[in-house]
Amino acid sequence: MPAAHHRGRAWEPFQGSHISDMMDTPTPPVEHQAPEAILVGGSAGAIEVVSLLMGSLPADFATPIVVLIHLPRHRPSALHGALAGRCRLVLREPEDKEPLAHSTVYLAPPDYHLLIDPGPSFALSVDEPVNFSRPSIDVLFESASQVLGPRCAGVLVSGANPDGAHGLRSIQRAGGLVAVQNPDDATCGVMPKAALALCPNLPVLSAMEISQWVQQLSPWQTSSSRGAR
């Protein structure tokens, strides 16, 4: 478990204005710009989607993946154990100030906000919960959109609250690639519906299609191991 850390600049809970609200027009997507990180956010019902994704990724998938699922804050996460048998990549919780590494899936630790800092590297924060959540998907996604801009991809899956909707819009407006799980395909459609309310033109994918979408985002894997296009 990472050591407790409080960032020098506190992350203020979102009250009214979000980063994405302050941007008047979206930045057009940048063609052929591969993401430096792929972010996956979810809550209730998300473990099934992430498990399917982990099982679909080849061992040579290079782009770092960051998974943030709302879990109980005051006990160790069981997510590593649930995914380890399916994942061919390195699977770990990030440490504060740790650089992002290729071919690694990072699992957000419970009771810490997880942010992307310049580098890119990780930062952990014990600032107050956002959207009743710590870690918060909005915090992760919005920090990544600031640091990585169009070199970031994000997908929001099944969940029982609207956390992550504003963050996904931030990634989209920074020119990053975004998608959302079809609410009808999700165990709990509240989270993807919140994202679609803010971004009506998001790609809407089933759990299987999300796995295929993610597989196509890494330019360094061999062509023989790519998913269906």
Image (cartoon, helix red, strand yellow):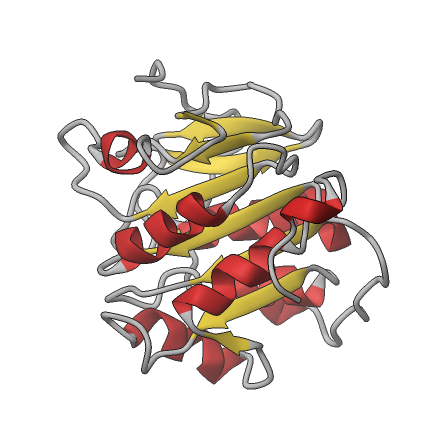
Foreground residue among 134 and 31: 31
Q: Quadrant of residue 71?
A: top left
Foreground residue among 14 and 95: 95
Instruction: Name the residue rendered at 22%, 32% in the picture.
Output: 77
Residue found at the very far front of the displayed protein: 224
Q: Quadrant of residue 216?
A: bottom right
Residue found at the very far right of the displayed protein: 31
Foreground residue among 152 and 140: 152
Instruction: Name the residue rendered at 43%, 51% in the picture.
Output: 53
Is the residue 49 above or below the residue 140 in the image? below
Instruction: Name the residue rendered at 24%, 60% in the picture.
Output: 45
Number of numbered markers: 0
**Where does the image place residue 38, in percent across and percent down from the top left?**
58, 47
Residue 165 in view (yes/no): no
Q: Quadrant of residue 73?
A: top left
Q: Is residue 79 left or right of residue 198?
A: left
Q: Quadrant of the C terminus?
A: bottom right
Instruction: Name the residue rendered at 46%, 32% in the picture.
Output: 88
Is the residue 189 above or below the residue 215 in the image? below
Foreground residue among 45 and 108: 45
Is the residue 86 above or below the residue 184 in the image? above
**Where does the image place residue 118, in percent across and percent down from the top left?**
69, 31
Residue 90 in view (yes/no): yes
Q: Quadrant of the N terminus?
A: top left
Is the residue 208 above or below the residue 33 in the image? below
**Where does the image place residue 176, in percent across and percent down from the top left?**
70, 59
**Where does the image place residue 127, in percent across and percent down from the top left?**
36, 36
Q: Is residue 57 left or right of residue 120?
A: left
Q: Is residue 101 left or right of residue 76?
A: right
